[in-house]
Amino acid sequence: MIDELLPDSASVAELFGDPPAGALLSQEESFVSRAVDKRKREFAAGRWCARRAMAGIGVPPAPILPGPRGEPRWPSGVLGAITHCDGYAAAVVARQGDVLSLGADAEPASPLPDGILEAVALPGERAGLLRCRRHDPSLPWDRLLFSAKESVYKAWFPMTGRPLEFEDAFITFDPDGGTFTAQLLVPGWRLGDSVLTGFEGRWAVRAGLVMTAVAVPSDRSRPAHGAGMAMGARR
C-alpha cells in the first residue's frame, strides 16, 4: 500500500500482524532483550520488513540497530525509514544516489487522542485542518497531520543530523490531490548550491490506516515518479 506514495527506486516491504519467529538477528535480539513484549514485537516487525525491503535492491541481510534518536542505522550505501503501529509494519529503502532521503509513516485511521493535536499542530495548521474537514469530514485529518510530521522528521534527521520539533515544520494538505507540503520554520539544509527549505509528500488512507511519505530525489530539478520532491530550493 505505502509503495504507491514512493518513487520507483524505493523498495517497500509490509507486514500485517505479528512477525515470524526468528525475525531478529542476534545483535538486534540483544538490543531489545529487556524491552516489554509490545516493543519487541514492533522492533522485530520493522526489522523483518527492513531486510525484505533491502533484498529488493540487492542488499544482503544485516543488523539494523537504532541510532541515538531511534533512527535506523542502515548498511553502507542504503537509506530508508521504518514505521509500525498496531497490526502493521513497513520499511522503505533505496540506494544512496537514487534518492537523497526517505521518510514514511503509518498510523491508525482514527482521530488523535484528546490533547495531542494541540501539542503537535500550529494554530495555522489547525485552521487548515478545519478546511480539510469541511472538504471531506470522513477522514482523520488530525492523524494525517501527525503522520506527515513524522515522515518529514524521518526524512530530515538522517540527512542533516539536526532535530526537528513538531512546531518546526508547517504542513499544508491538498485534500484533492493526495499531497502535502511541509515548509521548514528553521534554517534549511544546504545541498550543493541550493538550500532545502521544505518538502513535498503524499498521503493515502487504506485498510484502516493513514499513510504518508516523503522522498527527496537525488536530482531535485525533476520530481521523483510517484512521490513528492524537495521544495523551496534557494540558489
Image (cartoon, grey):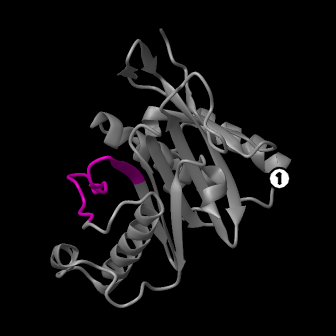
**Near-viewer residue (234 or 99):** 99
The stretch drawn in magenta includes residue 77: yes
Q: Is residue 177 in view from this perspective?
A: yes
Residue at position x 73%, y 44% in the image: 130
Residue at position x 41%, y 76% in the image: 45
- Quarter of the picture containing the N terminus is bottom right
The majority secondary structure of the magenta stretch comes to loop
The stretch drawn in magenta includes residue 204: no
* Residue farthest bottom in this picture: 21
* Residue farthest top in this picture: 235
For residue 111, side relative to residue 146 (left or right): right
Up-down: is 94 above or below 208? above
Magenta residues (range): 64-80
Residue at position x 47%, y 48% in the image: 103
Q: Is residue 114 in view from this perspective?
A: no
Please name the residue that numbered disc 1 is placed on.
Answer: 136
